[in-house]
Image (cartoon, helix red, strand yellow):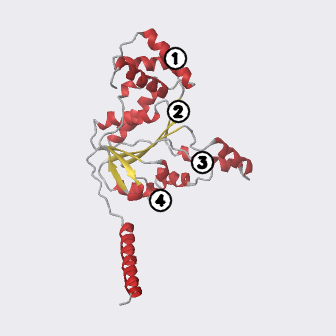
Amino acid sequence: MSVYEELLSQLTDVAQSLKQIAEQQKTVTKLVTDYSGNGFVWEADEQYLRPLAKINAIDIELLRNIDYQKQVLTDNTRQFAKGLTANNVLLWGARGMGKSSLTKAVYELIGAEYAELKLVEIHREDISSLPLLMRQLAERDERFILYCDDLSFDAGDDSYKSLKAILEGGLEGKAENVIFYATSNRRHLLPREMIENEQANAINVRDTIDEKVSLSDRFGLWVGFHNPSQTEYLGMVSNYAAHFGFDITDEKLRRAALEWAASRGGRTGRVAWQFITNLAGQLGVKL
């Protein structure tokens, strides 16, 4: 065999090996979900629910100045956990006011009472894979809250149309053991300029507006969140400080909390928690 023939043979072997590797990579191993846990994250690429060792949630009693929101979400979640009818929920409003924290805290509260209740997080970019997830969950005996944090749609994004059908089930009907909770800074999930621009260019303005806002109408419950007053903000800070046993006077706590809010350019529940996190480090307190 000549040198060239030998080289050609070796290159052919290499090519065949690379082809086999490529084919193996295309083969997706079907992962089997262990449903014994409480929280999961939907891995859309693998069509797999990844179990979480622990849900990142805080005690619901630490969430202040949202008593109405707590009650509404707790009642709806408990109804669903009992096997009764309940609504999809949109938690909307001011950023940093506890929308996602309340969702997880309510689940921890109700999930402790009903072991069959599970929380599944789906990322915004995976919304188009919801039909696959819904079919997977519909076959189970457990009850699932699908949770999407910071849900919104920008101009040119048509995935909101598929979500509308999913929320009400379309022809096949909605799975009775699945409910959808979403948080958003936008009440209608779409930017105002998107609605206004299409309104300006529409032949039938009313139809265009109805098409855009009908997505949020699919949520039976709208739970609004608003920025706190200074008194409410200080109440949040005091509640956290008392809960974690901070050794600091009320006056020092108040002054430091207001300085922190001023440096952040506003007062929100998130700002209060970030202040407490910083202060805990200074005082040597473990949260």
Mark 2: amino acid = Arg
Which label belongs to residue 258?
1
The residue that disc 4 covers is 171
| Label disc, if present, on residue 154 of the rendered structure | 3
**Against 215, is 278 above or below?**
above
Residue 155: x and y in percent read 62, 50
Q: Which residue is drawn at 49% across and 29% down?
A: 97
Which element is circle 3 on? loop
Q: Which of marks 2 and 4 is in front?
A: 2
Helix, strand or loop at mark 2:
loop
Q: Which of marks 1 and 2 is nearer the N terminus?
A: 2
Q: Which residue is drawn at 36% across and 64% down?
A: 28
Residue identified by numbered label 2: 95
Position of 235 relative to 125 (above/below): above
Local crowd at mark 3 within 10 Å, few (<14), some, or many (≥20)?
A: some
**Residue 263 placement, left or right of 246:** right
Neighbour tally class for label 4: few under 14, some 14-19, many 20 plus, Cα within 10 Å: few
